[in-house]
Image (cartoon, rainbow, N blue to C red):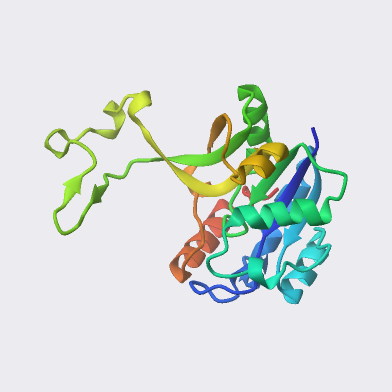
Amino acid sequence: MTIVAIIPARGGSKGVPRKNSRNMNGKPLVAWSIEQALAVPEVSRVIVSTDSENIAEIARQAGAEVPGLRPAHLAQDDTPTEPVLIHAIKTWCGDDIPGLVMLLQPTSPLRLPDSIGKAIEKLRRDEAQSLVSVCESHAFFWRNIGQPEALYDHRNRPRRQDIRPEDRWYRENGSIYLTETQTLLRERNRLAGKVSAYVMQECESWEIDSEIDFLIVEELMRRMNGDYRA
């Protein structure tokens, strides 16, 4: 089953201006995800979907395909990801429709060398139609701040080591998504059919949405001393 990796990278960003082309530990942010995808033998093509000529040139230099620029109506602040994926498949794959689409968001540049391959193995082993990457969360959540309500039993606060495996919480970390192409085209959702989950380490699970995130991830890269590289 062929796999095409699609990396969406808009030129605009409110939280971190021009973040996808900004230097992150020696190379543009988007280049990290491109290099990681190219290092996976199962991935046949790596396509960057962007509305920016600058990002397109960066992506090509990093080894990705940029067959054309994404239309402006698919590059707005409120544009969902699924229409971007479907546009890339229908516009740039032609009759060579892949069996699986892999979505790698460039704002999650920290992936350990074998994480993408293991996620693919997990999807196949589970015989699932889609996969989401997650990480375990040990946070205690509350809601309705006007009348605070705990989403756990705060009268019997559990210790981390006492939480049963079936009671543990996991958060979607935004790093790796896999979807059978026909399922994506039919349901217009990256998570549909039988959904599998691949658990990533905490260090891999940072999404860059702010300047603080950018600084934290850059420092993590330095401290990991290259272990995150594809």
Comparing 151 with 206, the one in front is 151
Tell whether 97 sits left or right of 113.
right
Q: Is residue 33 above or below residue 190?
A: below
**Residue 71 visible in the current orientation:** yes
Residue depicted at x 47% and y 63%: 213
How far across and down, in percent of the image, does residue 186 sit? 66, 41
**Residue 26 visible in the current orientation:** no
Comparing 105 with 116, the one in front is 105
Q: How many marks?
A: 0
Comparing 98 with 120, the one in front is 98
How far across and down, in percent of the image, does residue 42 sit? 78, 37
Residue depicted at x 87% and y 44%: 96
Q: Which quarter of the figure has residue 198?
A: top right
Q: Residue furthest front?
A: 186
The quarter of the image holding the N terminus is top right
Comparing 150 with 114, the one in front is 150
